[in-house]
């Protein structure tokens, strides 16, 4: 049975799932009304909270990290249909030792121009699935508190002294994805 996390909740994946090697980060949402194009992005950060190189920013135009540890499966432009709308695969043993944290951001493509926000969505979530067993380990459901936001930090995978932890962040903003790029480059 999957663990349901609340905002700020943390799970030590290494202790809970010691054999865990490959993780699917599934992100899902349902659209209310017109289609909204959400984009999942991953920032692989070093001990200084920065990208070791630009290629450690994984998103729809850079689908794989240089170490092979993170792979984005591609862009879903509508969010239509049940289940995960965008997926990111993490092969934990392949992730560069200099990467201490993996930040998962979901942003709305051209939010300002299109006048889209997270209030146009319902049932948004992030879940972690053990790829080998296809078993859901945890799920974090985002509430309605992000109604006016155009991007949300869904969660973080942290490497703390060789142990992987998942943190359910739930931090919304209206600064655009570029503000994250500027912050972490």
Image (cartoon, rainbow, N blue to C red):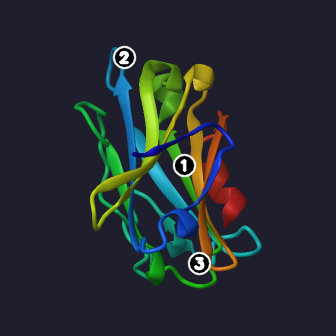
Q: Look at the picture and state if 167 lies above or below 66.
A: above
The quadrant of the image that shows the N terminus is top left
User: Mark 3 against mark 1, which lies toward the viewer?
Assistant: 1
Give residue 18's position: percent from left, percent from top: 48, 72
Of 17 and 179, nearer the camera is 17
**Which class describes the residues within 10 Å of circle 2: few (<14), some (14-19), or many (20+)?**
few
Q: Look at the picture and state if 165 lies above or below 46.
A: above
Q: Which circle marks residue 173 in the picture?
A: none
**Which class describes the residues within 10 Å of circle 1: few (<14), some (14-19), or many (20+)?**
many
Q: Most extreme residue toward the left, as rendered?
A: 81
Give residue 84's position: percent from left, percent from top: 31, 43
Earlier along the polypeptide chain: callout 3 or callout 1? 3
Of 77 and 137, nearer the camera is 137
Q: Look at the picture and state if 61 lies above or below 99.
A: above
Q: Can the viewer see residue 120 in this picture?
A: yes
At x 27%, y 63%, the residue is 133
Q: Which circle marks residue 53 in the picture?
A: 3
User: Mark 2 against mark 3, which lies toward the viewer?
Assistant: 2
Cα separation between marks 2 and 1? 21 Å
At x 47%, y 36%, the residue is 110
Asked if disc 2 and disc 3 are in contact, CB closer than 8 Å, the reply is no
Q: Secondary structure at mark 2?
A: loop
Q: Which circle marks residue 105 in the picture?
A: 1
At x 31%, y 49%, the residue is 75
Give residue 162's position: percent from left, percent from top: 63, 79
Earlier along the polypeptide chain: callout 2 or callout 3? 2
Q: Can the viewer see residue 117 in this picture?
A: no
At x 45%, y 25%, the residue is 114
The residue pinned by badge 2 equals 32
Cα separation between marks 3 and 1? 18 Å
């Amino acid at each position: 049975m999957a663990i349901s996390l609340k905002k700020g909740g943390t799970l030590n994946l290494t202790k809970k799932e010691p054999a865990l090697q490959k993780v699917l980060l599934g992100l899902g949402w349902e659209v209310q009304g017109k289609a909204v194009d959400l984009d999942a992005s991953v920032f692989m950060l070093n001990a200084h909270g920065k990208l070791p190189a630009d290629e450690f920013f994984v998103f729809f135009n850079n689908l794989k990290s240089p170490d092979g540890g993170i792979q984005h499966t591609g862009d879903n432009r509508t969010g239509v249909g049940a289940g995960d709308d965008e997926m990111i695969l993490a092969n934990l043993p392949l992730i560069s030792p200099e990467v201490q944290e993996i930040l998962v951001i979901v942003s709305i493509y051209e939010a300002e121009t299109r006048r889209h926000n997270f209030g146009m969505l319902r049932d948004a979530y992030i879940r972690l699935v053990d790829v080998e067993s296809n078993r859901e380990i945890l799920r974090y459901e985002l509430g309605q508190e992000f109604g006016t936001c155009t991007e949300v930090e869904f969660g973080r995978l942290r490497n703390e002294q060789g142990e992987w932890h998942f943190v359910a962040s739930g931090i919304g903003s209206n600064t655009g994805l570029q503000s994250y790029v500027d912050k972490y480059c």
